[in-house]
Amino acid sequence: MQWTKVLGLGLGAAALLGLGIILGHFAIPKKANSPAPSDLDLELLETVMGQLDAHRIRENLRELSREPHLASSPRDEDLVQLLLQRWKDPESGLDSAEAFTYEVLLSFPSQEQPNVVDIAMTLPPPPTVGPTGDIIHSCHRTEENVTGEQGGPDVVQPYAAYAPSGTPQGLLVYANRGTEEDFKELQTQGIKLEGTIALTRYGGVGRGAKAVNAAKHGVAGVLVYTDPADINDGLSLPNETFPNSWYLPPSGVERGSYYKYFGDPLTPYLPAIPSSFRLDLANVSGFPPIPTQPIVCSLGCPVNVSVYNRLELRNSSNVLGIIRGAVEPDRYVLYGNHRDSWVHGAVDPSSGTAVLLELSRVLGTLLKKGTWRPRRSIVFASWGAEEFGLIGSTEFTEEFFNKLQERTVAYINVDIAVFANATLRVQGTPPVQSVVFSATKEIRSPGPGDLSIYDNWIRYFNRSSPVYGLVPSLGSLGAGSDYAPFIHFLGISSMDIAYTYDRSKTSARIYPTYHTAFDTFDYVDKFLDPGFSSHQAVARTAGSIILRLSDSFFLPLKVSDYSETLRSFLQAAQQDLGALLEQHSISLGPLVTAVEKFEAAAAALGQRISALQKGSPDPLQVRMLNDQLMLLERTFLNPRAFPEERYYSHVLWATRTGSVATFPGLSNACSRARDTASGSEAWAEVQRQLSIVVTALEGAAATLRPVADL
Amino acid sequence: MQWTKVLGLGLGAAALLGLGIILGHFAIPKKANSPAPSDLDLELLETVMGQLDAHRIRENLRELSREPHLASSPRDEDLVQLLLQRWKDPESGLDSAEAFTYEVLLSFPSQEQPNVVDIAMTLPPPPTVGPTGDIIHSCHRTEENVTGEQGGPDVVQPYAAYAPSGTPQGLLVYANRGTEEDFKELQTQGIKLEGTIALTRYGGVGRGAKAVNAAKHGVAGVLVYTDPADINDGLSLPNETFPNSWYLPPSGVERGSYYKYFGDPLTPYLPAIPSSFRLDLANVSGFPPIPTQPIVCSLGCPVNVSVYNRLELRNSSNVLGIIRGAVEPDRYVLYGNHRDSWVHGAVDPSSGTAVLLELSRVLGTLLKKGTWRPRRSIVFASWGAEEFGLIGSTEFTEEFFNKLQERTVAYINVDIAVFANATLRVQGTPPVQSVVFSATKEIRSPGPGDLSIYDNWIRYFNRSSPVYGLVPSLGSLGAGSDYAPFIHFLGISSMDIAYTYDRSKTSARIYPTYHTAFDTFDYVDKFLDPGFSSHQAVARTAGSIILRLSDSFFLPLKVSDYSETLRSFLQAAQQDLGALLEQHSISLGPLVTAVEKFEAAAAALGQRISALQKGSPDPLQVRMLNDQLMLLERTFLNPRAFPEERYYSHVLWATRTGSVATFPGLSNACSRARDTASGSEAWAEVQRQLSIVVTALEGAAATLRPVADL
């Protein structure tokens, strides 16, 4: 221990003070330890379930959605302060809370020069598509002020964030949903697309993709509208819509980001702190290539589109609050939601934030009473600028990449807490299934009857599991909310929780007032969740999951549940690609072996844990097994697997564009290779993708085997 | 715990048997635990030091170097068996040992049609460089059989591995060391290079780079020779050289790999298991572009070069042996060396393997006595096919990437254990400095007098440290041996240990018989290390380091020693690039802040550990702090930092080509941007590289701060 002596000398007397501070620092967790760092306390769990209060969630929502709070707006900043104040409350606060600010590129319409879409007099068909004649109709620039909340300077005009400005004029062509196929179909029909304005409806593909597809055919501008058939179950009259029902009023227009990727567009893979290198605007990719504007009208005639969107560097903050773990403070259970909305955002995202605040209040109160401190740390997060492309959460993962990747047990996302009142809906990776099931079996469903959330859920979403029989089915995680950087970029087991529709009662693509000025407190209070019992159900579900993940001796992540997924991916590959692959002399044998090895290793690990649970295992033994559970998801990451797909590194959950429901890299590569000759680059890529998956699965199995095995 | 019930049902009765096996399995470490998992035992350390036997190392070396054992040759396979047998020995074996085999692309000269270099009659200077006249001299195809060991079918002809076959003919042009500058100089002198054969000498640049540089000027073939001035202190007569001295006989020729990258050329980033995707030969990059051959003669005249090298897929094995840790079996102290040689390879690599076998014998014997089991696991590795480009170790890191990255405490490499007898020489990253110092202060130096290895070392290599004063200086890790994938690709703290020259007594570029058929047992026994006391010194140094890393309660990795490196990189940037960067409006301010944050966090962590060491800290607390120490090196990895540099991801130790001794990405980018205008792509890359370093340092500091801090 020579160096400690040398260090002592080198640091001199100042170290004494430092030592005192440190000793003091370490005294705190020891004191806090005193409530006994035991396994999950079911009584405590019951207490928490009982304290999560629907009325308080309602009051949170009222405050959060009182004013529009577009990312980086003054009201958004006010909410940063509100969160900080709540999380620092001496009575019910967390151990610490702090705002982290990034300087990010956002896009806004001009206040002085609003975006305009004018319908001109019908012109004879071209030769010349040029400036059009007299204006016969101007589209609404704002939504109708139906409840008094759709007016005022803070209600941002409907617009397509990141669409370039420009004033294209041309004939209006109806292009359905603006998919590649839609434009090809128009071409097949002999319709000239060059110089036209494409009218598209929301849905089918991502927002930005409509403009990308259109531009490939020379289209000059894109309009996007919400079809009542897609969102309102066909209803559209004022007396059939909000404030008389949950349906979108005729003037409602969905705003949204049209950026292809996520994260700050100027700083991919780098945190958007002021000093970070920023791309030149000329080198930014992923913005829509042509002016684009969401509108309400849908006529067919010449049209003048004027888009005056501006890109601006703005400050946007995440707020983080932490409850320090008593035993393993370096293990983080991360729970988050975004804070920014397009307008008032009562549903999106404030329903989630209202739940977040209630959860942090109840856990904070327990903490301040001194009767409880979780085994692991709990981190609450309020993300900024999600609506522009998951920017706050992405920058956070870029800034603290290693720390998060090494220590995060799981990420729980509750964005829109309640879409509707029918049932729970969970998206997540397989290891979280068991903890969600455990939690929901113990909580009463808000509806009539005496069902658990689990028993109600299974009525709406279910599947037949080869292992468990009929169980609720979890969806898989795309990139629809802030979980995306956690699962795809960091490989952290993630989930997204909400209450949602009875699909037999509505075919709405999403809740009707989504991203409009009609998504207000009254909308939630009167139509979406009167009584806030669904909000409470989500709070209880999330709360139970947080406690189980943070307090259980063994992490309730069941890695063997990945076996079912792998088996189903493998079967799809065998059934739907096997013959094709064989034609090209590509064997699925190594994949079969790898899946089998994974299954065996995962099952054996489960048995080792069960065996240990029967005794009183050594804390270090538990820690080692928990590390295996926690880190499994990381083994599926390969940052070199999909070099074109920004952030997507998870070889099981990357975007699948191929039709076969198997490993995405394999599916996509096969779909591209299908019509090429053996020996083509495309077939080499199939083989490369297959090897990437095999290596990942073999590597995953290796991490699950006993740690001292070769 | 609902899912355990379900699992129990699902698995049925078979689980009972499994459970029994598992309980049995877990009983073993508990039993082994009994020798009390305490802190490093200094008495045990002394015992081990005493048992490491010079004579046994000598006998190991005799056996290992008895026959040529080129990678994948039958004798190489015999040595795989020898290692397995030793490591499975019931008396002195490890807990388990296994061979892992890869199918890799190697390159060999043809046995039927040896490579030939003929000197033709001098022709008049060109116009036509064409087939040349009568052969006046043929270069030796093999080395002279001086000791009876340079003949026979297993002595591979000197050749340039991975050089393409071909029979170029042309005028011989002397091109010094074949650097870019050397060829430019020839061009400046008006010498036509097109169609010539370039004669170059070893040194200055990598082997393959000579051919790459030559081909850019139209050169048709490259010859490489060893200049006696570079290797033999100018001596070259038979009576001055081996077997009469350690100098290379006149007929000696250095073999070597001319591949630019490392790892199996066909499977970058994938393990070379049989099923892995392999690049088409047409798509392989990094081979020399023109026929190349190492030779002994150095005349100036027309020359015919005939290279008949062949690429072959061969099986090559790593052998791994493990001592399971008693307390933290999931923490690996990894110690390795390659096994394959070019010919007998007594020095390279068998001197290291002889030490490896003696270390594993002594520790294995202790283990079998039942009086000792290390706290953490110790993994011994014998790598295959290093000479062809670190292939075995690289494939191993590709196959077990996550497992190794999550769990490896440090990698210790002893390749050539003894270059010469004067002094220790260590290359490594800053955190290993302290453990090397601690170890070497306690071991007597083999030379005359009563110095410790440390005190002897400091006489040959030293520097003035701002923190410690005069200390031995560690070199930094390039890619010269199997540590390369561990530090550059996985970010594992690594070191390379050897005994080496007194530079005042020789200017040899490397020991003279390097990669020749004269590198034999007698060479070592008579000239390099008679008595094997330097081998013993290396064994003791490595043994002490292994024990300190595997048995110490707190990991002896001193992360604050990175502060000196960062500070010196920063100062170099400020002094040598500051003005230039300012001209281009690039501030080093964020880098200064990041370095300061790192320094503060590292110092504070050191103080927390010191404070804890005074008490009796909780095992979990120790584990958490050790994780911070172990994982620090990982935070410097960024797989997207240098997309062109295969495997190089460590932002502090990637290859530096720029002249300023600062962060390599910054240094290289500045060197490329220097002569371009502000706003160029090259200057954007400087800014990007600066942000990459700042993000890495800020992220590193974040991982060193108290784990529950935001």
Image (cartoon, coloured by chain):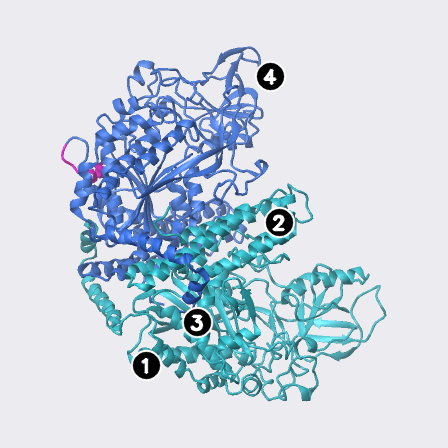
Chain colours: A blue, B cyan
Chain letter of disc 4 in the image: A
The answer to whether tags 1 and 4 share a subunit is: no
Neighbor class of circle 2 (other Cα within 10 Å; few <14, some 14-19, many 20+) is: some
Q: Looking at the picture, which amino acid does disc 1 mark?
A: Pro
Question: Which residue does the image show at 50% across and 68% down from the upper left?
Answer: B482
Which corner quadrant of the image does residue A527 belong to?
Answer: top left
**Near-viewer residue (A359 or A147):** A359
Q: Nearer the viewer, mark 1 or mark 2?
A: 2
Disc 4 designates what residue? Answer: A131
In the rendered image of this protein, does residue B588 appear above or below residue B485?
above
Callout 3: chain: B
Q: Quick check: do tags 3 and 1 share a chain?
A: yes
Q: Is residue B138 above or below residue A245?
A: below
Q: CA distance from mark 3 to mark 2?
A: 38 Å
**Residue underneath mark 1:** B90
State which region is magenta: A449-459
Q: Residues within 10 Å of mark 4 (few under 14, many from 20)?
A: some
Residue B11 as seen in the image, left or right of residue B369: left
CA separation in Å, label 3 and label 4: 82 Å
Mark 1 vs mark 4: in front: 1
